[in-house]
Image (cartoon, helix red, strand yellow):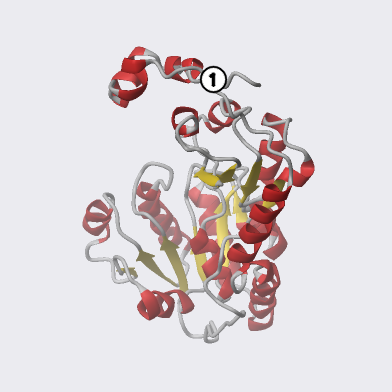
Amino acid sequence: MVTYSNVLGMPFFADLDGASRRIGILHGPWPDQTKHVRSVRGFLDGVIAISSQQMELAARLLPELAAERVAFLPNPSGHDGFETQQPPLQDRPLVVGYCGRVQREQKRVERLPKLVDELNRAGVSYRFELLGSGPGLAGLRRQFAGNPNVVLHDRRQGEEYWQVLRNWDVLVFVSDYEGVPISLIEGLSVGVIPLFPRIGSGVDAYVTRVKPDLLYPPGDLTAAARALQSLARLSEAELAALRRRCGEIVQPHLGECDLAAMSAFVRRIRDLPQISCAAFPPRPFYWSDHCPFGLLRRLWPAGFWRGNLAPTNR
């Protein structure tokens, strides 16, 4: 049995993997995901996905998969139970954090200075912290230099990571697209309230359950700052209620949830009949094994080699 993360590489490697069952793990979304998932029809025996949105996409694009062949894979929180230890907000700033890859593609971290500017303009008492590393970090260091309300932690691991995360009130995202980020699940597990763009990701349902107006229009940092300003004005009882909702939402993600779900799904697919292709045409010698992928992409962006490796028993 072989699993393919985001079904990447499957059209190229499926005739080599020797598998009696193939499982796709959908973490998406990403640009061109629909086209890519549709291209693996006939290659799969099942799909396990990190959100209901990704499960629905698999069911729509891969209709050969019956409902029992599509399942939910919860991202792990890293905790066996829910905890929250944020001190009262009275007489201290609202601590807003970003956690993840520090890059422009997908994460759009160049929007973070605009968010800080909007918080200043709104007169919010805040501290903004960034936890992570990536190619955009140097630029953010320059832009935030001299701002006493901004702390850049770079990357942290182990208990150092959790100590930073536990001190946050809000975890903010400014992404163009997401699946269900593990950092969001980890934040929920320690009572950090999410603020997320309404980008049609698997996160929308989570955030709406905490507080509907914590989903803001994509790219609208003024609206994001207003949502943070609204949170800063809540009473301690109201903030505690939001954190309890975080704890309720994260329950399916506690403990070894992902291992249990994956193990059960693998056993289920093993016991079902194989429906993935087992016969393939011969591999075109040059195009499949010797031509660099970069050249193939330029010559045949529509996927010439995929057509040549299509299964013969669809």
Q: Nearer the viewer, residue 303 or 33?
A: 303
Q: Is residue 109 above or below residue 22?
A: below
Q: Quadrant of the C terminus?
A: top right
Query: At which x and y percent is residue 237?
Result: 68, 82
Query: Along the line of sight, which residue is nearer the eye, 243 or 37?
Result: 37
Instruction: Name the residue: 60% across, 73% down.
Output: 233
> Taking the image as drawn, is residue 99 in sight?
yes
Query: In this orientation, which residue lies closer to the viewer: 97 or 228?
Result: 97
Looking at the image, which is closer to me, 289 or 77? 289
- Say which element carries label 1: loop
Q: Please name the residue that numbered disc 1 is placed on.
A: 310
Q: In this orientation, does residue 229 appear?
A: no
Q: Residue at position x 59%, y 71% from top?
A: 256
Residue 134 appears left or right of 252: left
Figure check: 11 above or below 295? below
Answer few, some or many: residues within 10 Å of disc 1's Cα (few below 14, many 20 plus, some between 14 and 19). Answer: many
* Residue 158 percent across, percent down from the top left: 38, 76
| Residue depicted at x 28% and y 22% | 290
Q: How many marks?
A: 1
* Percent x, y of residue 291: 29, 20
**Where is 186 relative to 136, above or below?**
below
